[in-house]
Amino acid sequence: MQINFLGAARTVTGSFYIVESEKATFVVDCGMFQGSESIVERNKADYPINPESIDFFILTHAHIDHSGLIPRLCKNGFKGKIYCSSATKDLCSVMLPDSGHIQEWEAERINRNLKDTDQPAVEPLYTPRDADNALDQFTILELDEIHRPVEGIEMNFREAGHILGSCIVELWIEEGGRKTKVVFSGDLGRPKQPFVRDPAFIEEADYLILESTYGDRLHPEMPDRPAELKKIIDETLKAGGNLIIPSFAVERTQDLLYDLSILQSEKQLAPDIAVYIDSPLAIAATEIFKRNFEFYDRETNHLIREGHHPLQMPNMKYSHTKDESMAINKIKSGAIIISASGMCDAGRIQYHLLHNLWRPECTIMFVGYQAEGTLGRQIVSGEKTVELFGKEISVEARIEDNQAYSAHADQKDILNWLDHFKKKPKTLFIVHGEEDAQETLAHLIQKKLAIETFIPDWRDRVELKPI
Protein backbone atom coordinates (compact mmCIF):
# COMPACT_ATOMS: atom_id res chain seq x y z
CA MET A 1 0.00 0.00 0.00
CA GLN A 2 1.24 3.46 -0.85
CA ILE A 3 0.16 6.97 0.09
CA ASN A 4 0.85 9.98 -2.11
CA PHE A 5 1.02 13.33 -0.27
CA LEU A 6 -0.40 15.79 -2.80
CA GLY A 7 -1.21 18.63 -0.41
CA ALA A 8 -0.78 20.06 3.10
CA ALA A 9 2.82 18.78 2.96
CA ARG A 10 5.13 21.30 4.64
CA THR A 11 2.32 23.81 4.24
CA VAL A 12 -1.04 24.35 5.90
CA THR A 13 -3.50 24.24 3.03
CA GLY A 14 -4.41 21.96 0.13
CA SER A 15 -5.02 18.69 2.01
CA PHE A 16 -5.02 15.89 -0.59
CA TYR A 17 -3.92 12.27 -0.20
CA ILE A 18 -4.19 9.33 -2.61
CA VAL A 19 -3.97 5.82 -1.13
CA GLU A 20 -3.27 2.90 -3.47
CA SER A 21 -3.85 -0.57 -2.04
CA GLU A 22 -4.46 -4.09 -3.36
CA LYS A 23 -8.19 -3.57 -2.91
CA ALA A 24 -8.73 -0.03 -4.22
CA THR A 25 -7.35 3.40 -5.00
CA PHE A 26 -9.01 6.14 -2.99
CA VAL A 27 -8.65 9.79 -2.01
CA VAL A 28 -8.83 11.49 1.38
CA ASP A 29 -9.68 15.19 0.95
CA CYS A 30 -8.95 17.35 -2.07
CA GLY A 31 -8.48 20.88 -0.78
CA MET A 32 -7.51 24.18 -2.29
CA PHE A 33 -4.07 25.69 -1.74
CA GLN A 34 -4.22 29.18 -0.23
CA GLY A 35 -1.49 31.71 0.48
CA SER A 36 1.46 32.82 -1.64
CA GLU A 37 1.35 32.89 -5.43
CA SER A 38 3.69 29.92 -5.71
CA ILE A 39 1.52 27.83 -3.36
CA VAL A 40 -1.73 28.83 -5.10
CA GLU A 41 -0.20 27.76 -8.43
CA ARG A 42 -0.36 24.16 -7.17
CA ASN A 43 -4.14 24.24 -7.61
CA LYS A 44 -3.50 23.79 -11.33
CA ALA A 45 -1.08 20.86 -10.96
CA ASP A 46 -1.58 17.66 -12.95
CA TYR A 47 -2.66 14.54 -11.11
CA PRO A 48 -0.16 11.68 -10.69
CA ILE A 49 -2.89 9.21 -11.65
CA ASN A 50 -5.95 9.30 -13.89
CA PRO A 51 -8.92 10.53 -11.79
CA GLU A 52 -11.08 7.93 -13.56
CA SER A 53 -9.06 5.20 -11.81
CA ILE A 54 -10.01 6.42 -8.31
CA ASP A 55 -12.58 4.10 -6.72
CA PHE A 56 -13.96 6.34 -3.96
CA PHE A 57 -13.32 9.51 -1.99
CA ILE A 58 -13.38 10.34 1.75
CA LEU A 59 -13.97 13.94 2.86
CA THR A 60 -13.06 14.81 6.46
CA HIS A 61 -14.86 18.18 6.57
CA ALA A 62 -16.14 21.10 4.52
CA HIS A 63 -13.41 23.74 4.83
CA ILE A 64 -12.18 24.83 1.40
CA ASP A 65 -8.58 23.79 2.11
CA HIS A 66 -9.96 20.23 2.40
CA SER A 67 -12.84 20.27 -0.10
CA GLY A 68 -12.17 23.12 -2.53
CA LEU A 69 -10.73 21.14 -5.46
CA ILE A 70 -13.32 18.35 -5.46
CA PRO A 71 -15.20 19.91 -8.44
CA ARG A 72 -11.96 20.02 -10.43
CA LEU A 73 -11.23 16.36 -9.64
CA CYS A 74 -14.74 15.37 -10.75
CA LYS A 75 -14.54 17.59 -13.83
CA ASN A 76 -11.34 15.74 -14.76
CA GLY A 77 -12.88 12.30 -14.60
CA PHE A 78 -13.54 11.08 -11.05
CA LYS A 79 -16.99 9.44 -11.04
CA GLY A 80 -17.05 7.58 -7.71
CA LYS A 81 -18.82 8.27 -4.43
CA ILE A 82 -17.67 11.03 -2.07
CA TYR A 83 -18.26 9.88 1.52
CA CYS A 84 -18.82 12.45 4.26
CA SER A 85 -21.11 13.39 7.16
CA SER A 86 -24.50 14.98 6.55
CA ALA A 87 -23.41 18.38 7.90
CA THR A 88 -20.33 18.32 5.65
CA LYS A 89 -22.50 17.69 2.60
CA ASP A 90 -24.87 20.52 3.58
CA LEU A 91 -22.01 22.96 4.06
CA CYS A 92 -20.32 21.94 0.81
CA SER A 93 -23.61 22.49 -1.01
CA VAL A 94 -23.16 26.24 -0.48
CA MET A 95 -19.37 26.50 -0.18
CA LEU A 96 -18.37 24.74 -3.40
CA PRO A 97 -20.72 26.66 -5.76
CA ASP A 98 -19.58 29.86 -4.03
CA SER A 99 -15.98 28.84 -4.71
CA GLY A 100 -16.95 28.19 -8.33
CA HIS A 101 -18.15 31.78 -8.64
CA ILE A 102 -14.81 32.97 -7.22
CA GLN A 103 -12.91 30.84 -9.76
CA GLU A 104 -14.95 32.37 -12.60
CA TRP A 105 -14.43 35.88 -11.28
CA GLU A 106 -10.67 35.32 -10.91
CA ALA A 107 -10.39 33.97 -14.47
CA GLU A 108 -12.34 36.97 -15.82
CA ARG A 109 -10.05 39.37 -13.93
CA ILE A 110 -6.92 37.71 -15.33
CA ASN A 111 -8.33 37.67 -18.86
CA ARG A 112 -9.13 41.39 -18.72
CA ASN A 113 -5.47 42.04 -17.94
CA LEU A 114 -4.41 39.75 -20.79
CA LYS A 115 -6.72 41.36 -23.32
CA ASP A 116 -4.03 43.35 -25.14
CA THR A 117 -1.31 40.72 -24.90
CA ASP A 118 -0.40 37.64 -26.93
CA GLN A 119 -1.02 35.31 -23.99
CA PRO A 120 -3.94 32.88 -24.22
CA ALA A 121 -7.02 33.35 -22.05
CA VAL A 122 -7.20 31.25 -18.87
CA GLU A 123 -10.02 28.96 -17.85
CA PRO A 124 -11.44 28.87 -14.31
CA LEU A 125 -10.41 25.88 -12.23
CA TYR A 126 -14.12 25.04 -12.19
CA THR A 127 -17.50 26.73 -12.38
CA PRO A 128 -20.59 26.73 -10.14
CA ARG A 129 -22.12 24.14 -12.49
CA ASP A 130 -19.07 21.90 -12.03
CA ALA A 131 -19.55 22.24 -8.27
CA ASP A 132 -23.24 21.32 -8.52
CA ASN A 133 -22.35 18.27 -10.62
CA ALA A 134 -19.78 17.15 -8.04
CA LEU A 135 -22.34 17.45 -5.25
CA ASP A 136 -24.38 14.72 -6.95
CA GLN A 137 -21.58 12.30 -6.02
CA PHE A 138 -21.73 13.07 -2.27
CA THR A 139 -22.91 10.16 -0.10
CA ILE A 140 -23.76 10.64 3.57
CA LEU A 141 -22.40 8.25 6.20
CA GLU A 142 -23.29 8.12 9.89
CA LEU A 143 -20.57 8.61 12.48
CA ASP A 144 -19.45 5.71 14.70
CA GLU A 145 -20.59 3.03 12.27
CA ILE A 146 -18.40 0.66 10.24
CA HIS A 147 -18.83 1.12 6.48
CA ARG A 148 -17.38 -0.97 3.63
CA PRO A 149 -16.87 1.09 0.46
CA VAL A 150 -15.27 -1.92 -1.29
CA GLU A 151 -14.44 -5.49 -0.32
CA GLY A 152 -11.40 -5.56 1.97
CA ILE A 153 -11.63 -1.94 3.20
CA GLU A 154 -13.59 -0.77 6.26
CA MET A 155 -13.90 2.76 7.54
CA ASN A 156 -15.38 4.59 10.48
CA PHE A 157 -16.04 8.32 10.91
CA ARG A 158 -15.38 9.71 14.39
CA GLU A 159 -16.01 13.18 15.81
CA ALA A 160 -13.07 15.56 15.14
CA GLY A 161 -14.49 18.52 17.09
CA HIS A 162 -13.19 21.06 14.56
CA ILE A 163 -16.30 22.31 12.76
CA LEU A 164 -19.83 21.02 12.40
CA GLY A 165 -19.65 17.59 10.75
CA SER A 166 -15.85 17.29 10.86
CA CYS A 167 -14.50 13.75 11.16
CA ILE A 168 -11.47 11.69 12.06
CA VAL A 169 -11.27 8.72 9.69
CA GLU A 170 -10.36 5.21 10.82
CA LEU A 171 -9.49 2.79 7.99
CA TRP A 172 -8.82 -0.96 8.07
CA ILE A 173 -7.19 -2.05 4.79
CA GLU A 174 -6.63 -5.71 3.98
CA GLU A 175 -3.58 -6.76 1.96
CA GLY A 176 -2.16 -10.26 1.66
CA GLY A 177 -4.63 -11.52 4.22
CA ARG A 178 -3.49 -8.97 6.86
CA LYS A 179 -5.24 -5.80 8.01
CA THR A 180 -3.46 -2.50 8.43
CA LYS A 181 -5.13 0.31 10.35
CA VAL A 182 -4.57 3.82 8.97
CA VAL A 183 -6.03 6.89 10.70
CA PHE A 184 -6.42 10.37 9.22
CA SER A 185 -6.93 12.96 11.94
CA GLY A 186 -8.44 15.53 9.59
CA ASP A 187 -8.35 18.83 11.49
CA LEU A 188 -8.56 18.26 15.23
CA GLY A 189 -10.59 20.72 17.25
CA ARG A 190 -10.11 22.21 20.69
CA PRO A 191 -12.05 20.81 23.63
CA LYS A 192 -15.04 22.76 24.96
CA GLN A 193 -15.85 24.72 21.82
CA PRO A 194 -19.38 26.04 21.16
CA PHE A 195 -21.68 23.86 19.08
CA VAL A 196 -19.35 20.94 18.34
CA ARG A 197 -18.61 17.95 20.53
CA ASP A 198 -15.05 17.32 21.74
CA PRO A 199 -12.74 15.24 19.51
CA ALA A 200 -13.09 11.48 19.91
CA PHE A 201 -10.10 9.56 21.21
CA ILE A 202 -8.70 6.79 19.03
CA GLU A 203 -7.33 3.71 20.75
CA GLU A 204 -4.99 2.26 18.14
CA ALA A 205 -3.45 2.68 14.71
CA ASP A 206 -0.60 1.29 12.65
CA TYR A 207 -0.13 4.55 10.73
CA LEU A 208 -1.44 8.02 11.58
CA ILE A 209 -1.64 11.09 9.33
CA LEU A 210 -1.78 13.99 11.80
CA GLU A 211 -2.45 17.70 11.36
CA SER A 212 -0.04 20.19 12.97
CA THR A 213 -1.37 23.71 12.35
CA TYR A 214 -0.63 24.81 15.93
CA GLY A 215 2.05 22.20 16.59
CA ASP A 216 4.60 24.78 17.74
CA ARG A 217 2.44 26.87 20.06
CA LEU A 218 -0.10 26.91 22.84
CA HIS A 219 -3.35 28.80 22.77
CA PRO A 220 -3.80 31.24 25.63
CA GLU A 221 -5.55 29.72 28.60
CA MET A 222 -9.21 29.57 27.66
CA PRO A 223 -10.43 33.06 28.61
CA ASP A 224 -13.92 34.24 29.27
CA ARG A 225 -14.42 34.72 25.54
CA PRO A 226 -17.62 36.81 25.69
CA ALA A 227 -16.00 39.09 28.30
CA GLU A 228 -12.92 39.57 26.11
CA LEU A 229 -15.14 40.33 23.12
CA LYS A 230 -17.16 42.84 25.15
CA LYS A 231 -13.98 44.64 26.20
CA ILE A 232 -12.92 45.07 22.55
CA ILE A 233 -16.41 46.20 21.54
CA ASP A 234 -16.61 48.75 24.35
CA GLU A 235 -13.17 50.21 23.63
CA THR A 236 -13.86 50.48 19.90
CA LEU A 237 -17.24 52.12 20.32
CA LYS A 238 -15.82 54.53 22.92
CA ALA A 239 -13.15 55.53 20.37
CA GLY A 240 -15.94 56.26 17.84
CA GLY A 241 -15.15 53.52 15.34
CA ASN A 242 -16.38 50.20 13.96
CA LEU A 243 -15.32 46.70 14.90
CA ILE A 244 -14.39 44.81 11.71
CA ILE A 245 -14.01 41.04 12.02
CA PRO A 246 -12.62 39.08 9.06
CA SER A 247 -14.18 35.71 9.67
CA PHE A 248 -14.41 32.33 8.04
CA ALA A 249 -17.99 31.75 6.93
CA VAL A 250 -18.17 28.33 8.57
CA GLU A 251 -17.84 27.83 12.33
CA ARG A 252 -15.95 31.02 13.18
CA THR A 253 -18.87 33.29 12.25
CA GLN A 254 -21.25 31.08 14.21
CA ASP A 255 -18.90 31.06 17.23
CA LEU A 256 -18.88 34.86 17.20
CA LEU A 257 -22.67 34.95 17.06
CA TYR A 258 -22.75 32.51 19.97
CA ASP A 259 -20.69 34.88 22.15
CA LEU A 260 -22.56 37.99 21.02
CA SER A 261 -25.87 36.31 21.85
CA ILE A 262 -24.56 35.43 25.32
CA LEU A 263 -23.64 39.08 25.88
CA GLN A 264 -27.04 40.20 24.68
CA SER A 265 -28.93 37.71 26.85
CA GLU A 266 -26.99 39.01 29.86
CA LYS A 267 -27.80 42.61 28.82
CA GLN A 268 -24.11 43.40 28.30
CA LEU A 269 -24.58 44.27 24.63
CA ALA A 270 -26.85 47.21 23.94
CA PRO A 271 -29.76 46.24 21.67
CA ASP A 272 -29.07 49.23 19.39
CA ILE A 273 -25.60 47.98 18.40
CA ALA A 274 -26.09 46.53 14.95
CA VAL A 275 -24.32 43.25 14.15
CA TYR A 276 -23.89 42.83 10.38
CA ILE A 277 -23.22 39.45 8.78
CA ASP A 278 -21.89 40.59 5.42
CA SER A 279 -21.27 37.34 3.59
CA PRO A 280 -23.87 35.39 1.63
CA LEU A 281 -21.87 32.24 2.35
CA ALA A 282 -21.80 32.90 6.10
CA ILE A 283 -25.55 33.57 6.04
CA ALA A 284 -26.20 30.28 4.25
CA ALA A 285 -23.83 28.43 6.61
CA THR A 286 -25.62 29.88 9.64
CA GLU A 287 -28.94 28.54 8.36
CA ILE A 288 -27.29 25.12 7.87
CA PHE A 289 -26.02 25.26 11.45
CA LYS A 290 -29.55 25.87 12.66
CA ARG A 291 -30.79 22.78 10.82
CA ASN A 292 -28.00 20.41 11.91
CA PHE A 293 -28.68 20.54 15.63
CA GLU A 294 -28.02 16.77 15.99
CA PHE A 295 -24.29 17.62 15.82
CA TYR A 296 -24.49 20.14 18.69
CA ASP A 297 -22.80 19.48 21.99
CA ARG A 298 -24.70 19.13 25.26
CA GLU A 299 -24.16 22.75 26.34
CA THR A 300 -25.60 24.24 23.14
CA ASN A 301 -28.64 21.98 23.23
CA HIS A 302 -29.21 23.02 26.85
CA LEU A 303 -29.22 26.70 25.84
CA ILE A 304 -31.80 26.02 23.15
CA ARG A 305 -34.03 24.07 25.54
CA GLU A 306 -33.88 27.05 27.89
CA GLY A 307 -35.29 29.23 25.09
CA HIS A 308 -32.06 30.93 24.08
CA HIS A 309 -30.88 30.08 20.56
CA PRO A 310 -27.27 31.25 20.09
CA LEU A 311 -27.79 32.00 16.40
CA GLN A 312 -30.74 34.33 16.78
CA MET A 313 -30.50 37.98 17.87
CA PRO A 314 -32.94 40.84 17.22
CA ASN A 315 -30.14 43.24 16.24
CA MET A 316 -28.43 40.83 13.79
CA LYS A 317 -28.66 42.04 10.20
CA TYR A 318 -27.95 39.93 7.12
CA SER A 319 -26.42 41.63 4.07
CA HIS A 320 -27.43 39.49 1.11
CA THR A 321 -26.86 41.86 -1.80
CA LYS A 322 -23.97 43.96 -3.07
CA ASP A 323 -25.98 47.14 -2.44
CA GLU A 324 -26.66 46.12 1.17
CA SER A 325 -22.95 45.47 1.64
CA MET A 326 -21.98 48.84 0.16
CA ALA A 327 -24.44 50.61 2.44
CA ILE A 328 -22.58 49.30 5.50
CA ASN A 329 -19.47 51.19 4.40
CA LYS A 330 -21.33 54.46 4.98
CA ILE A 331 -21.49 53.67 8.72
CA LYS A 332 -18.64 55.45 10.48
CA SER A 333 -19.12 54.21 14.05
CA GLY A 334 -21.06 51.88 16.31
CA ALA A 335 -21.21 48.80 14.06
CA ILE A 336 -19.91 45.25 14.40
CA ILE A 337 -19.19 43.95 10.90
CA ILE A 338 -18.45 40.24 10.40
CA SER A 339 -17.40 39.52 6.84
CA ALA A 340 -15.48 36.98 4.73
CA SER A 341 -12.96 35.88 3.79
CA GLY A 342 -11.25 35.07 7.05
CA MET A 343 -7.73 35.60 5.64
CA CYS A 344 -8.78 38.77 3.77
CA ASP A 345 -7.57 37.42 0.44
CA ALA A 346 -10.94 37.83 -1.32
CA GLY A 347 -14.55 38.80 -0.75
CA ARG A 348 -16.43 41.67 0.83
CA ILE A 349 -14.05 42.01 3.78
CA GLN A 350 -11.58 43.78 1.51
CA TYR A 351 -14.04 46.64 0.97
CA HIS A 352 -14.58 47.00 4.73
CA LEU A 353 -10.81 47.13 5.21
CA LEU A 354 -10.58 49.74 2.46
CA HIS A 355 -13.00 51.96 4.39
CA ASN A 356 -11.79 51.27 7.95
CA LEU A 357 -8.19 50.01 8.04
CA TRP A 358 -6.74 53.54 7.87
CA ARG A 359 -8.95 54.86 10.70
CA PRO A 360 -7.27 54.75 14.17
CA GLU A 361 -10.64 54.75 15.93
CA CYS A 362 -11.56 51.39 14.36
CA THR A 363 -10.52 47.87 15.36
CA ILE A 364 -9.77 44.94 13.07
CA MET A 365 -10.10 41.72 15.07
CA PHE A 366 -8.74 38.50 13.55
CA VAL A 367 -10.26 35.29 14.86
CA GLY A 368 -8.46 32.58 12.89
CA TYR A 369 -5.24 31.33 11.38
CA GLN A 370 -3.70 33.61 8.74
CA ALA A 371 -1.77 31.59 6.16
CA GLU A 372 1.59 32.80 4.89
CA GLY A 373 1.22 35.08 1.87
CA THR A 374 -2.32 36.29 2.67
CA LEU A 375 -3.39 39.87 3.28
CA GLY A 376 -4.50 38.89 6.78
CA ARG A 377 -1.00 37.60 7.55
CA GLN A 378 0.51 40.92 6.41
CA ILE A 379 -1.77 42.88 8.73
CA VAL A 380 -1.32 40.74 11.85
CA SER A 381 2.44 40.66 11.22
CA GLY A 382 2.56 44.43 11.66
CA GLU A 383 2.88 45.73 8.10
CA LYS A 384 2.41 49.52 8.12
CA THR A 385 0.87 49.64 4.64
CA VAL A 386 -0.92 47.05 2.52
CA GLU A 387 -2.27 47.03 -1.01
CA LEU A 388 -6.02 46.92 -1.63
CA PHE A 389 -7.52 47.25 -5.10
CA GLY A 390 -4.27 48.70 -6.41
CA LYS A 391 -4.03 51.33 -3.65
CA GLU A 392 -1.55 51.60 -0.79
CA ILE A 393 -3.57 51.71 2.44
CA SER A 394 -2.04 52.79 5.73
CA VAL A 395 -2.67 50.43 8.65
CA GLU A 396 -3.77 52.82 11.39
CA ALA A 397 -6.61 50.82 12.97
CA ARG A 398 -6.09 48.85 16.17
CA ILE A 399 -5.24 45.24 15.26
CA GLU A 400 -6.34 42.39 17.52
CA ASP A 401 -5.24 38.79 16.87
CA ASN A 402 -7.72 36.92 19.06
CA GLN A 403 -6.58 33.30 19.19
CA ALA A 404 -9.34 32.33 21.61
CA TYR A 405 -11.49 31.59 18.54
CA SER A 406 -9.11 29.11 16.96
CA ALA A 407 -10.87 25.87 16.03
CA HIS A 408 -7.58 23.93 15.85
CA ALA A 409 -6.06 21.86 18.62
CA ASP A 410 -2.84 23.39 19.89
CA GLN A 411 0.37 21.55 20.79
CA LYS A 412 -0.89 20.49 24.22
CA ASP A 413 -4.24 19.32 22.81
CA ILE A 414 -2.52 17.25 20.09
CA LEU A 415 -0.15 15.58 22.55
CA ASN A 416 -3.04 14.84 24.91
CA TRP A 417 -5.01 13.29 22.04
CA LEU A 418 -2.04 11.13 21.07
CA ASP A 419 -1.52 10.06 24.67
CA HIS A 420 -4.94 8.33 24.63
CA PHE A 421 -3.77 5.74 22.07
CA LYS A 422 -3.52 2.37 23.82
CA LYS A 423 -1.56 0.99 20.86
CA LYS A 424 0.66 3.74 19.50
CA PRO A 425 1.14 4.12 15.73
CA LYS A 426 4.30 2.63 14.24
CA THR A 427 4.77 5.72 12.09
CA LEU A 428 3.18 9.13 12.32
CA PHE A 429 3.08 11.44 9.28
CA ILE A 430 2.88 15.11 10.17
CA VAL A 431 0.95 17.25 7.69
CA HIS A 432 -1.13 20.43 7.50
CA GLY A 433 1.28 22.87 9.13
CA GLU A 434 4.06 25.31 8.40
CA GLU A 435 7.53 23.80 8.61
CA ASP A 436 8.41 25.25 12.04
CA ALA A 437 5.20 23.85 13.52
CA GLN A 438 5.81 20.45 11.96
CA GLU A 439 9.45 20.21 13.05
CA THR A 440 8.64 21.27 16.61
CA LEU A 441 5.77 18.83 16.94
CA ALA A 442 7.78 15.97 15.41
CA HIS A 443 10.59 16.50 17.91
CA LEU A 444 8.17 16.54 20.87
CA ILE A 445 6.34 13.41 19.74
CA GLN A 446 9.58 11.49 19.34
CA LYS A 447 10.85 12.71 22.71
CA LYS A 448 7.70 12.26 24.80
CA LEU A 449 5.91 9.38 23.08
CA ALA A 450 8.75 7.57 21.27
CA ILE A 451 6.77 7.38 18.03
CA GLU A 452 8.61 7.44 14.70
CA THR A 453 7.64 10.61 12.82
CA PHE A 454 8.00 11.60 9.20
CA ILE A 455 7.30 14.99 7.58
CA PRO A 456 6.48 14.40 3.89
CA ASP A 457 7.28 16.81 1.13
CA TRP A 458 4.79 17.75 -1.54
CA ARG A 459 4.21 14.78 -3.87
CA ASP A 460 6.16 12.35 -1.70
CA ARG A 461 5.08 8.75 -2.22
CA VAL A 462 5.49 6.49 0.82
CA GLU A 463 4.97 2.77 1.24
CA LEU A 464 2.92 1.60 4.24
CA LYS A 465 3.98 -1.93 5.04
CA PRO A 466 1.69 -4.29 7.01
CA ILE A 467 2.63 -4.38 10.69
Image (tube, rainbow, N blue to C red):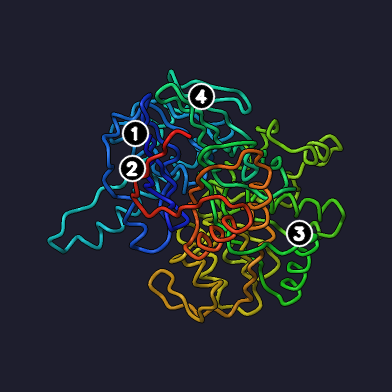
Q: Which of marks 2 and 3 is in front?
A: 3
Mark 4–mark 1 contact, CB under 8 Å? no
SS label for mark 1: helix
Q: Which comes before the other along the chain, label 4 or label 1?
A: 1
Q: Is mark 2 on a helix, strand or loop?
A: loop
Q: Which amino acid does label 1 sit on?
A: Cys
The residue beneath circle 1 is 74
For the residues carrying marks 1 and 2, which lies nearer the camera in this image?
Answer: 1
Residue 405 location in percent, x, y? Answer: 67, 57
- State which tag comes first along the sequence, 1 or 2: 1
The tag on residue 126 is 2
Residue 383 vertical placement versus 180 (above, below): below
Residue type, label 3: Met
- Residue named by callout 3: 222
Q: Which mark is residue 154?
A: 4
Disc number lying in front (1 or 3): 3
Amino acid type, callout 2: Tyr
| Mark closest to the chain's N terminus, 2 or 3 | 2
For this rendering, which residue is in front, 217 or 385? 217
Q: Which of marks 4 and 3 is nearer the N terminus?
A: 4
* Of the image marks 2 and 4, the number of the one nearer the N terminus: 2
Asked if 142 appears above or below 98 in the picture, the reply is: above
Amino acid marked by disc 4: Glu
- Secondary element under disc 3, as helix, strand or loop, is loop
User: Are the residues flagged by discs 1 and 2 in contact, CB closer than 8 Å?
Assistant: no
